Image (spheres, rainbow, N blue to C red):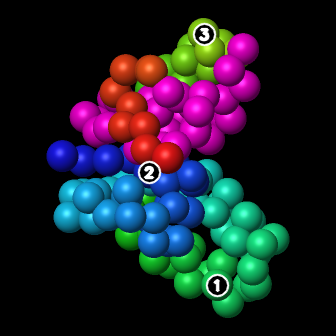
Amino acid sequence: MKYFLDTYAMVEISNGNLRYLRFRNHKMFTSFFHLYELYYSTLRDHNEETARLLFYKFFDCIVFIKAEHIFKASHFKLEHRKANISYADAIGYCIAEIEGMRFLTGDIAFKGIKNVEFVQ
């Protein structure tokens, strides 16, 4: 199984959340947007050294964004606008769906949406 990691999932994996342990032997992917969010939140909450360490920990997991991802994500975000889903998560979810991955998150906005592996 392949998983697309949103920022929530990367933070929980980095923090050693045992509920995310079962995903460690699966192929994991993410986007530059999610790495940006991870870097920013780690820099805000910790320090630059830790932020860079986590950034590069997931750097090899990057999936490049295609036009079709953007088009689908825009429709998805419009459809779920009441859930206040971020642009990054909308595109991450659609990358996962198009590329045959499960979207791994603990973000409550995604609870109950198809193709989501929801773990808190």
Residue 108, picture quadrant: top right
Q: Position of residue 11 (x, y in %)?
A: 56, 63
For image coordinates 66% across by 29% down, the residue present is 85
At label 3, counting other C-alpha atoms closer than 10 Å, the crowd grade (few under 14, some 14-19, many 20 or more) is few
Mark 1 → mark 2, Cα distance in angstroms: 19 Å
- The answer to which of marks 1 and 2 sits earlier in the sequence is 2
Q: Residue 79 carries which label?
A: 3
The kind of residue on which mark 2 rests is: Leu
Mark 3 → mark 1, Cα distance in angstroms: 36 Å
> Can I make out residue 35 in this image?
yes
The residue tagged 2 is 5
The kind of residue on which mark 1 rests is: Thr
For image coordinates 81% across by 71% down, the residue present is 44
Asked if the residues shown at circle 3 and circle 1 are in contact, with their CB atoms under 8 angstroms apart, the answer is: no
The kind of residue on which mark 3 rests is: Glu
Q: Which mark is residue 24?
A: none
Q: Is mark 3 on a helix, strand or loop?
A: helix
Q: Is residue 98 above or below residue 57?
A: above
* Drawn side of residue 83 relative to residue 112, left or right: right
Q: Does the magenta stretch include residue 39?
A: no
Q: Is residue 58 above or below residue 81?
A: below
Residue 82, picture quadrant: top right
